[in-house]
Image (cartoon, grey):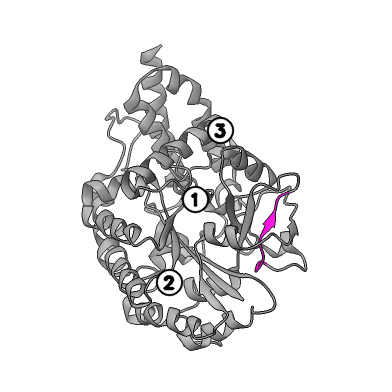
């Protein structure tokens, strides 16, 4: 049996406006640019993808199921700029075929710096999911799929039944991502690993004419999924929701692929679609998987170098979290929210110099001319945050 477990990530950060060292305005965020991006991606991706998913669920009478995780920063921006997107996600929730996952509200790297802040952001996110979609998530996914044994143990103590992670070769060795596992000494929580090869075939290679498998059809992909039968229980396909219409534009045929894929997969009598919690309930773990070192979904290395590789990133993160205690002791809710918006991992990704010279993807996502501009702008904002903290002392 091959149970396909689709999970889609929805995230939009609060991008900063240009902020000089002489600026004293407490409005740090580029409201016009953020709203413009939300409207653009909503029209290209969120609204048409939600409609295709809703039609597909109805066409297959509930046999097509999947999971979504939406960050708090995205939810807030939808609420203010594109409430119709929230309504579309709510319609998906009402079908009973879509499971919403938990994560850090601000898409932060907080687990690496403050377990207290990590817990608080997760609780904020849990409340938001319950408010908007009337679900209490059983499954957790950390920012950027950052994972190790410590993350699993901490999340297990928070009451989650499962956690998602990257099926990186260096942690699996000869084992397969197509089974469930448990972390060492914590049999309560189950681990679902991304099948990154099949996931990336859709998310990154779908429209690449230089790819030897181009064009990718629903029939061809379903054959690859069928090969898991007898060699695994699950096919975990994890990717950004923005794959549909934004990263892979509509004229690539991505929406038609999405419309036809469930039918092609369900043609095999042993195949079905499950949400992550359904997979946890249905399958027993194959065994323990020891992951002492941190992994993520990012790049070939599947490490944290996209956010932590250089001195600028390390300095910005350390200076941000040095203020945590003072910000919280101030009792200023607006100050705390501003500080937390700065914790989104995107701000530190923009500072990455790892592939800046030849990485068109990074340049596409970054609103800055260079990683150095990003660092200077961020630190100027953080300096103003620090000044506000001092006025509370």
| Residue in the image at 74% along x and 47% along y | 292
Q: Which residue is mark 3?
A: 318
- Work out whether residue 323 can be spotted: no
Quarter of the figure that contains the C terminus: top left
Q: Residue furthest top?
A: 393
Q: Nearer the viewer, residue 85 or 26?
A: 85
Query: Mark 2 and mark 3 in contact (Cβ < 8 Å)?
Result: no
Q: Position of residue 264 (x, y in %)?
A: 47, 85
Asked whether residue 368 is drawn in magenta, I would say no
Query: Mark 1 and mark 3 in contact (Cβ < 8 Å)?
Result: no
Q: Secondary structure at mark 1?
A: helix
Q: Compute the Cα span from label 1 to label 2.
A: 34 Å
Q: Which residue is mark 2?
A: 64
Q: Secondary structure at mark 3?
A: helix
Label whose residue precedes the other's in the sequence (3 or 2) = 2
Q: Which residues are magenta?
A: 177-183
Label whose residue precedes the other's in the sequence (1 or 2) = 2
Q: Position of residue 368 (x, y in %)?
A: 39, 52
Q: Compute the Cα span from label 3 to label 2.
A: 44 Å
Q: Position of residue 360 (x, y in %)?
A: 46, 66
| Residue in the image at 59% along x and 46% along y | 308
Label whose residue precedes the other's in the sequence (3 or 1) = 3
| Residue in the image at 59% along x and 75% along y | 2
Q: Which residue is mark 1?
A: 349
Q: Which of the two discs, 1 and 2, sits closer to the camera? A: 2
Q: Quadrant of residue 300?
A: bottom right
Q: Horizontally, is 207 left or right of 285 in the view? A: left
Q: Nearer the viewer, residue 282 or 374?
A: 282
């Amino acid at each position: 049996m091959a149970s396909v477990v689709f999970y889609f990530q929805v995230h939009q950060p609060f991008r900063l406006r240009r902020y000089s060292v002489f600026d004293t305005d407490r409005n740090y965020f580029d409201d016009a640019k953020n709203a413009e991006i939300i409207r653009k991606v909503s029209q290209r991706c969120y609204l048409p993808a939600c409609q295709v998913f809703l039609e597909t669920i109805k066409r297959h009478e509930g046999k097509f199921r999947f999971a979504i995780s939406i960050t708090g920063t995205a939810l807030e921006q939808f609420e203010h700029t594109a409430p119709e997107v929230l309504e579309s996600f709510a319609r998906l929730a009402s079908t009973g075929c879509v499971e919403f996952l938990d994560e850090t509200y601000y898409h932060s790297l907080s687990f690496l710096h403050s377990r207290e802040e990590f817990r608080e952001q997760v609780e904020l996110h849990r409340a938001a999911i319950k408010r908007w979609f009337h679900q209490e998530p059983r499954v957790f996914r950390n920012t950027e799929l950052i994972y190790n044994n410590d993350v699993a143990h901490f999340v297990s103590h928070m009451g989650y039944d499962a956690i998602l992670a990257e099926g990186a070769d260096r942690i699996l060795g000869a084992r397969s991502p197509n089974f469930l596992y448990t972390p060492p000494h914590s049999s309560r929580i189950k681990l679902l690993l991304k099948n990154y090869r099949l996931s990336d075939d859709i998310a990154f290679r779908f429209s690449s004419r230089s790819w030897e498998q181009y064009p990718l059809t629903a029939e061809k992909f379903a054959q690859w999924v069928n090969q898991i039968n007898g060699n695994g229980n699950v096919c975990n396909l994890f990717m950004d929701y923005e794959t549909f219409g934004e990263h892979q534009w509509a004229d690539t045929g991505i929406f038609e692929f999405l419309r036809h894929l469930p039918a092609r997969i369900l043609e095999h009598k042993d195949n079905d679609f499950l949400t992550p919690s359904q997979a946890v309930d249905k399958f027993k773990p194959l065994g323990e998987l020891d992951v002492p070192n941190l992994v993520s979904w990012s790049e070939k290395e599947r490490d944290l170098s996209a956010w932590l590789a250089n001195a600028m990133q390390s300095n910005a993160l350390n200076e941000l979290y040095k203020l945590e205690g003072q910000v919280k002791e101030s009792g200023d809710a607006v100050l705390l929210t501003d500080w937390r918006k700065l914790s989104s991992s995107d701000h530190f990704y923009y500072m990455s110099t790892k592939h800046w010279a030849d990485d068109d993807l990074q340049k596409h996502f970054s609103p800055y001319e260079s990683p150095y501009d990003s660092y200077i702008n961020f630190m100027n904002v953080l300096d103003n945050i620090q000044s506000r903290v001092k006025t509370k002392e």
